[in-house]
Image: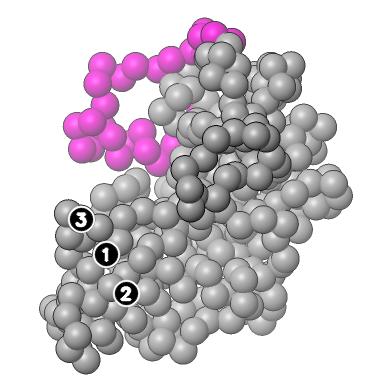
Amino acid sequence: MDAKPGAQHRPGVRAFPDTFTWGLSSAAYPSEGSAGRGACSWDAFRRAHGTARDEHTGDHRRWESDLDLLASLKVGGYRLSVSWPRLQPDGRGELNPEAVRFYRALLSGLRARGIEPYVTLYHWDLPAALEAEGGWTERETALRFAEYAGRTVAALGDLVTHWITLNEPWSSAFLGYGYGTHAPGRTDLTAAVAAAHHLALAHGLATVRIRRADPAAKVGIANTVTDIVAASDSAADRAAADRLDAIVNRIFLDPIYRGRHDSLTLDCVDPMGLWALMRTGDLDVMSTPADFAGISHGPPLVARHDPAAPFGAADLPAPAHS
Protein backbone atom coordinates (compact mmCIF):
# COMPACT_ATOMS: atom_id res chain seq x y z
CA MET A 1 0.00 0.00 0.00
CA ASP A 2 1.73 3.15 -1.14
CA ALA A 3 1.85 6.01 1.34
CA LYS A 4 -0.55 8.80 0.42
CA PRO A 5 0.40 12.47 0.47
CA GLY A 6 -1.40 14.63 2.97
CA ALA A 7 -2.04 11.78 5.41
CA GLN A 8 -2.32 12.76 9.07
CA HIS A 9 0.48 11.68 11.39
CA ARG A 10 1.12 12.00 15.07
CA PRO A 11 3.48 14.82 16.05
CA GLY A 12 7.07 13.67 15.99
CA VAL A 13 6.36 10.66 13.76
CA ARG A 14 7.96 11.02 10.34
CA ALA A 15 5.72 10.06 7.40
CA PHE A 16 6.79 7.42 4.95
CA PRO A 17 7.70 8.95 1.58
CA ASP A 18 5.30 8.68 -1.32
CA THR A 19 7.72 6.29 -3.02
CA PHE A 20 7.63 3.80 -0.13
CA THR A 21 6.00 0.51 -1.12
CA TRP A 22 4.01 -1.48 1.41
CA GLY A 23 3.87 -5.17 0.71
CA LEU A 24 3.39 -8.71 1.94
CA SER A 25 5.55 -11.79 1.57
CA SER A 26 5.47 -15.56 1.44
CA ALA A 27 7.83 -18.47 0.79
CA ALA A 28 7.38 -21.16 -1.85
CA TYR A 29 7.72 -24.18 0.45
CA PRO A 30 4.74 -23.48 2.78
CA SER A 31 2.57 -21.66 0.25
CA GLU A 32 2.87 -23.84 -2.87
CA GLY A 33 2.86 -27.35 -1.48
CA SER A 34 4.84 -30.17 -3.07
CA ALA A 35 2.72 -31.16 -6.08
CA GLY A 36 4.78 -31.05 -9.25
CA ARG A 37 8.15 -30.31 -7.68
CA GLY A 38 11.19 -32.38 -6.83
CA ALA A 39 12.04 -33.38 -3.28
CA CYS A 40 13.85 -30.84 -1.12
CA SER A 41 15.83 -30.90 2.12
CA TRP A 42 12.82 -29.81 4.19
CA ASP A 43 10.70 -32.80 3.14
CA ALA A 44 12.94 -35.32 4.89
CA PHE A 45 13.49 -32.95 7.83
CA ARG A 46 9.74 -32.57 8.42
CA ARG A 47 9.18 -36.32 8.28
CA ALA A 48 12.06 -36.98 10.67
CA HIS A 49 10.76 -34.45 13.18
CA GLY A 50 7.09 -35.36 12.93
CA THR A 51 5.90 -32.01 11.58
CA ALA A 52 4.42 -33.33 8.33
CA ARG A 53 0.65 -33.68 8.70
CA ASP A 54 -0.95 -36.19 6.34
CA GLU A 55 1.69 -35.34 3.72
CA HIS A 56 -0.48 -32.64 2.14
CA THR A 57 0.89 -31.69 -1.26
CA GLY A 58 -1.06 -28.69 -2.55
CA ASP A 59 -1.57 -28.04 -6.24
CA HIS A 60 -1.85 -24.25 -6.66
CA ARG A 61 -5.60 -24.23 -7.33
CA ARG A 62 -6.23 -21.06 -5.33
CA TRP A 63 -3.34 -18.85 -6.40
CA GLU A 64 -5.52 -16.52 -8.48
CA SER A 65 -7.87 -15.87 -5.54
CA ASP A 66 -4.78 -15.27 -3.42
CA LEU A 67 -3.71 -12.55 -5.85
CA ASP A 68 -7.20 -11.07 -5.70
CA LEU A 69 -6.85 -10.96 -1.92
CA LEU A 70 -3.54 -9.12 -2.26
CA ALA A 71 -5.17 -6.64 -4.60
CA SER A 72 -8.03 -6.08 -2.18
CA LEU A 73 -5.49 -5.12 0.48
CA LYS A 74 -4.08 -2.52 -1.91
CA VAL A 75 -0.49 -3.58 -1.41
CA GLY A 76 2.07 -2.21 -3.84
CA GLY A 77 4.50 -5.12 -3.65
CA TYR A 78 4.61 -8.84 -3.01
CA ARG A 79 7.78 -10.64 -2.03
CA LEU A 80 7.56 -14.28 -3.04
CA SER A 81 10.08 -17.02 -3.54
CA VAL A 82 10.40 -19.41 -6.43
CA SER A 83 11.19 -23.02 -5.62
CA TRP A 84 14.55 -24.34 -6.77
CA PRO A 85 13.34 -28.00 -6.73
CA ARG A 86 10.24 -27.00 -8.73
CA LEU A 87 12.26 -25.24 -11.40
CA GLN A 88 15.19 -27.69 -11.32
CA PRO A 89 14.01 -30.89 -9.59
CA ASP A 90 17.54 -32.32 -9.32
CA GLY A 91 19.32 -28.98 -8.94
CA ARG A 92 20.86 -29.18 -12.41
CA GLY A 93 20.06 -28.75 -16.06
CA GLU A 94 17.17 -27.29 -17.98
CA LEU A 95 14.27 -25.71 -16.12
CA ASN A 96 11.02 -27.61 -15.75
CA PRO A 97 8.72 -26.08 -18.42
CA GLU A 98 5.61 -26.65 -16.28
CA ALA A 99 7.19 -24.73 -13.40
CA VAL A 100 8.19 -21.89 -15.72
CA ARG A 101 4.60 -21.68 -17.00
CA PHE A 102 3.25 -21.61 -13.45
CA TYR A 103 5.56 -18.82 -12.32
CA ARG A 104 4.98 -16.79 -15.47
CA ALA A 105 1.24 -16.98 -14.87
CA LEU A 106 1.69 -16.01 -11.22
CA LEU A 107 3.96 -13.07 -12.02
CA SER A 108 1.73 -11.91 -14.86
CA GLY A 109 -1.22 -12.05 -12.47
CA LEU A 110 0.60 -9.82 -10.01
CA ARG A 111 1.49 -7.30 -12.70
CA ALA A 112 -2.08 -7.28 -14.04
CA ARG A 113 -3.24 -6.28 -10.55
CA GLY A 114 -0.66 -3.51 -10.26
CA ILE A 115 1.49 -5.37 -7.72
CA GLU A 116 5.28 -5.29 -8.09
CA PRO A 117 6.91 -8.72 -7.58
CA TYR A 118 10.08 -9.01 -5.51
CA VAL A 119 11.38 -12.51 -6.11
CA THR A 120 13.61 -14.54 -3.80
CA LEU A 121 15.54 -17.28 -5.59
CA TYR A 122 16.33 -19.34 -2.48
CA HIS A 123 14.28 -19.56 0.70
CA TRP A 124 15.88 -22.67 2.24
CA ASP A 125 14.41 -25.39 -0.02
CA LEU A 126 17.56 -27.05 -1.37
CA PRO A 127 16.94 -29.82 -3.94
CA ALA A 128 17.30 -33.15 -2.13
CA ALA A 129 19.70 -34.42 -4.79
CA LEU A 130 22.18 -31.67 -3.91
CA GLU A 131 21.71 -32.17 -0.17
CA ALA A 132 22.57 -35.83 -0.65
CA GLU A 133 25.90 -34.69 -2.12
CA GLY A 134 26.71 -32.55 0.92
CA GLY A 135 24.43 -29.57 0.37
CA TRP A 136 25.83 -26.15 1.26
CA THR A 137 28.96 -27.67 2.79
CA GLU A 138 30.13 -28.29 -0.78
CA ARG A 139 31.43 -25.61 -3.15
CA GLU A 140 29.64 -27.34 -6.01
CA THR A 141 26.28 -26.26 -4.55
CA ALA A 142 27.25 -22.60 -4.94
CA LEU A 143 28.09 -23.22 -8.59
CA ARG A 144 24.79 -25.03 -9.14
CA PHE A 145 22.89 -22.17 -7.50
CA ALA A 146 24.47 -19.62 -9.81
CA GLU A 147 23.46 -21.72 -12.82
CA TYR A 148 19.90 -22.02 -11.50
CA ALA A 149 19.73 -18.26 -10.87
CA GLY A 150 20.88 -17.42 -14.38
CA ARG A 151 18.42 -19.81 -16.01
CA THR A 152 15.53 -18.58 -13.86
CA VAL A 153 16.16 -14.92 -14.59
CA ALA A 154 16.45 -15.67 -18.30
CA ALA A 155 13.04 -17.37 -18.15
CA LEU A 156 11.22 -14.88 -15.93
CA GLY A 157 13.20 -11.65 -16.08
CA ASP A 158 10.79 -9.82 -18.37
CA LEU A 159 8.26 -9.98 -15.51
CA VAL A 160 10.61 -9.23 -12.58
CA THR A 161 12.86 -6.29 -11.81
CA HIS A 162 13.96 -7.04 -8.22
CA TRP A 163 15.70 -10.31 -7.39
CA ILE A 164 16.80 -11.47 -3.92
CA THR A 165 19.43 -14.18 -4.17
CA LEU A 166 19.17 -15.73 -0.69
CA ASN A 167 16.83 -15.31 2.23
CA GLU A 168 18.56 -15.33 5.64
CA PRO A 169 21.62 -17.38 4.70
CA TRP A 170 22.67 -17.39 8.38
CA SER A 171 19.64 -19.55 9.15
CA SER A 172 20.47 -21.91 6.28
CA ALA A 173 24.05 -22.28 7.50
CA PHE A 174 23.89 -22.27 11.28
CA LEU A 175 20.36 -23.42 12.05
CA GLY A 176 20.52 -26.01 9.29
CA TYR A 177 24.04 -27.39 9.67
CA GLY A 178 25.23 -26.19 13.10
CA TYR A 179 22.32 -26.34 15.53
CA GLY A 180 19.99 -28.77 13.77
CA THR A 181 16.77 -26.78 14.13
CA HIS A 182 16.31 -26.23 10.38
CA ALA A 183 16.75 -28.61 7.47
CA PRO A 184 18.86 -30.63 6.95
CA GLY A 185 19.09 -30.94 10.75
CA ARG A 186 22.84 -31.37 11.15
CA THR A 187 24.70 -30.42 14.33
CA ASP A 188 28.23 -29.71 13.18
CA LEU A 189 29.56 -26.16 13.50
CA THR A 190 32.42 -26.92 11.12
CA ALA A 191 29.80 -27.81 8.51
CA ALA A 192 27.91 -24.61 9.36
CA VAL A 193 30.99 -22.47 8.70
CA ALA A 194 31.56 -24.25 5.38
CA ALA A 195 27.90 -23.65 4.49
CA ALA A 196 28.21 -19.96 5.40
CA HIS A 197 31.21 -19.56 3.11
CA HIS A 198 29.51 -21.29 0.20
CA LEU A 199 26.25 -19.40 0.65
CA ALA A 200 28.06 -16.06 0.53
CA LEU A 201 29.93 -17.28 -2.54
CA ALA A 202 26.64 -18.42 -4.11
CA HIS A 203 25.21 -14.93 -3.66
CA GLY A 204 28.12 -13.33 -5.49
CA LEU A 205 28.21 -15.90 -8.29
CA ALA A 206 24.44 -15.63 -8.75
CA THR A 207 24.58 -11.82 -8.86
CA VAL A 208 27.00 -12.03 -11.77
CA ARG A 209 24.85 -14.59 -13.60
CA ILE A 210 21.64 -12.61 -13.02
CA ARG A 211 23.12 -9.46 -14.51
CA ARG A 212 24.43 -11.45 -17.45
CA ALA A 213 20.93 -12.80 -18.08
CA ASP A 214 19.25 -9.41 -17.55
CA PRO A 215 21.44 -6.29 -17.36
CA ALA A 216 18.45 -4.26 -16.11
CA ALA A 217 17.86 -6.52 -13.09
CA LYS A 218 18.15 -5.14 -9.55
CA VAL A 219 19.85 -7.64 -7.27
CA GLY A 220 20.24 -7.92 -3.50
CA ILE A 221 20.30 -10.36 -0.61
CA ALA A 222 18.19 -10.54 2.56
CA ASN A 223 20.46 -10.99 5.57
CA THR A 224 19.64 -11.52 9.19
CA VAL A 225 20.65 -8.49 11.26
CA THR A 226 20.29 -8.96 15.00
CA ASP A 227 20.88 -6.54 17.89
CA ILE A 228 23.20 -8.15 20.44
CA VAL A 229 23.80 -6.77 23.91
CA ALA A 230 25.91 -8.02 26.79
CA ALA A 231 24.14 -9.57 29.78
CA SER A 232 26.24 -7.38 32.10
CA ASP A 233 28.97 -4.74 32.05
CA SER A 234 31.65 -7.32 32.74
CA ALA A 235 34.51 -7.53 30.27
CA ALA A 236 33.76 -11.23 29.75
CA ASP A 237 30.12 -10.62 28.80
CA ARG A 238 31.01 -7.70 26.54
CA ALA A 239 33.58 -9.88 24.76
CA ALA A 240 30.95 -12.61 24.42
CA ALA A 241 28.57 -10.10 22.81
CA ASP A 242 31.28 -9.12 20.33
CA ARG A 243 31.89 -12.76 19.43
CA LEU A 244 28.20 -13.45 18.98
CA ASP A 245 27.89 -10.36 16.77
CA ALA A 246 30.79 -11.65 14.67
CA ILE A 247 29.11 -15.02 14.14
CA VAL A 248 25.50 -13.89 13.81
CA ASN A 249 25.94 -10.67 11.82
CA ARG A 250 29.42 -9.98 10.52
CA ILE A 251 30.13 -13.43 9.08
CA PHE A 252 27.86 -12.48 6.14
CA LEU A 253 27.76 -8.68 6.23
CA ASP A 254 31.51 -8.13 6.09
CA PRO A 255 32.42 -10.30 3.09
CA ILE A 256 29.33 -9.23 1.12
CA TYR A 257 29.51 -5.49 1.77
CA ARG A 258 33.17 -4.92 2.69
CA GLY A 259 34.98 -7.64 0.76
CA ARG A 260 36.73 -9.05 3.82
CA HIS A 261 36.19 -10.87 7.07
CA ASP A 262 36.49 -9.11 10.40
CA SER A 263 39.49 -10.29 12.43
CA LEU A 264 37.26 -11.35 15.32
CA THR A 265 35.14 -13.47 12.99
CA LEU A 266 38.27 -15.16 11.72
CA ASP A 267 39.46 -15.80 15.27
CA CYS A 268 36.12 -17.47 16.02
CA VAL A 269 35.95 -19.69 12.95
CA ASP A 270 39.60 -20.28 12.10
CA PRO A 271 39.61 -23.57 14.08
CA MET A 272 36.75 -24.71 11.83
CA GLY A 273 38.76 -24.48 8.65
CA LEU A 274 37.48 -21.37 6.90
CA TRP A 275 40.84 -20.60 5.33
CA ALA A 276 41.03 -24.08 3.87
CA LEU A 277 37.80 -23.31 1.99
CA MET A 278 38.86 -19.84 0.81
CA ARG A 279 40.18 -19.56 -2.73
CA THR A 280 41.79 -16.62 -4.43
CA GLY A 281 39.07 -14.28 -5.62
CA ASP A 282 36.28 -15.64 -3.39
CA LEU A 283 35.93 -12.41 -1.41
CA ASP A 284 35.89 -10.36 -4.61
CA VAL A 285 33.01 -12.48 -5.89
CA MET A 286 31.11 -12.32 -2.60
CA SER A 287 31.34 -8.52 -2.57
CA THR A 288 30.00 -8.02 -6.10
CA PRO A 289 28.10 -4.72 -5.65
CA ALA A 290 24.40 -5.10 -4.87
CA ASP A 291 21.57 -2.77 -5.87
CA PHE A 292 19.75 -2.99 -2.54
CA ALA A 293 20.06 -4.64 0.87
CA GLY A 294 17.36 -6.74 2.49
CA ILE A 295 17.20 -6.89 6.29
CA SER A 296 15.46 -9.51 8.39
CA HIS A 297 15.50 -7.90 11.82
CA GLY A 298 14.54 -10.25 14.63
CA PRO A 299 14.41 -9.88 18.42
CA PRO A 300 17.66 -8.96 20.19
CA LEU A 301 20.01 -11.49 21.74
CA VAL A 302 21.52 -11.07 25.19
CA ALA A 303 25.04 -12.51 25.30
CA ARG A 304 26.65 -14.08 28.35
CA HIS A 305 30.15 -15.48 28.60
CA ASP A 306 30.03 -19.28 28.73
CA PRO A 307 33.20 -21.26 27.98
CA ALA A 308 31.10 -24.38 27.36
CA ALA A 309 28.92 -22.73 24.69
CA PRO A 310 29.88 -22.48 21.01
CA PHE A 311 32.27 -19.56 20.48
CA GLY A 312 32.27 -19.00 24.26
CA ALA A 313 28.99 -17.09 24.17
CA ALA A 314 25.55 -18.18 25.29
CA ASP A 315 22.54 -16.23 24.06
CA LEU A 316 19.72 -15.57 26.52
CA PRO A 317 16.12 -14.50 25.88
CA ALA A 318 15.73 -10.75 25.59
CA PRO A 319 13.90 -8.94 28.42
CA ALA A 320 10.12 -8.78 27.94
CA HIS A 321 10.20 -5.00 27.49
CA SER A 322 12.70 -5.12 24.61
Which residues lie in the magenta part? 38-65
**Whether label 2 touches label 1, CB < 8 Å:** yes
**Dot 2: what SS?**
helix
Q: Position of residue 148 (x, y in %)?
A: 66, 44
The amino acid marked with disc number 1 is Leu
Q: Name the residue at 20% across, 55% down.
A: 321
Q: Which mark is residue 321?
A: 3
Q: Is residue 317 visible?
A: no
- 2 vs 1, front mark: 1
Q: Position of residue 311 (x, y in %)?
A: 26, 79
Work out which quarter of the rendered image holds the C terminus and state it.
Answer: bottom left
**In the drawing, does residue 85 fall left or right of residue 54?**
right
Q: Which mark is residue 244?
A: 2
Q: Residue furthest right?
A: 215
Q: Residue furthest front?
A: 11
Q: Which mark is residue 301?
A: 1
**Whether label 3 touches label 2, CB < 8 Å:** no
Q: Nearer the viewer, residue 136 or 61?
A: 61
Work out which quarter of the rendered image holds the N terminus and state it.
Answer: top right
Q: Nearer the viewer, residue 18 or 158?
A: 18
- 3 vs 2, front mark: 3
Q: Quadrant of residue 143?
A: bottom right
Q: CA distance from mark 2 to mark 1?
A: 9 Å
Q: Name the residue at 32% across, 70% down.
A: 228
Q: Count residues near mark 2 (Cα–Cα under 10 Å), then give few for <14, some for 14-19, many for 20+.
A: many
**Of callouts 3 and 1, the N-terminal one:** 1
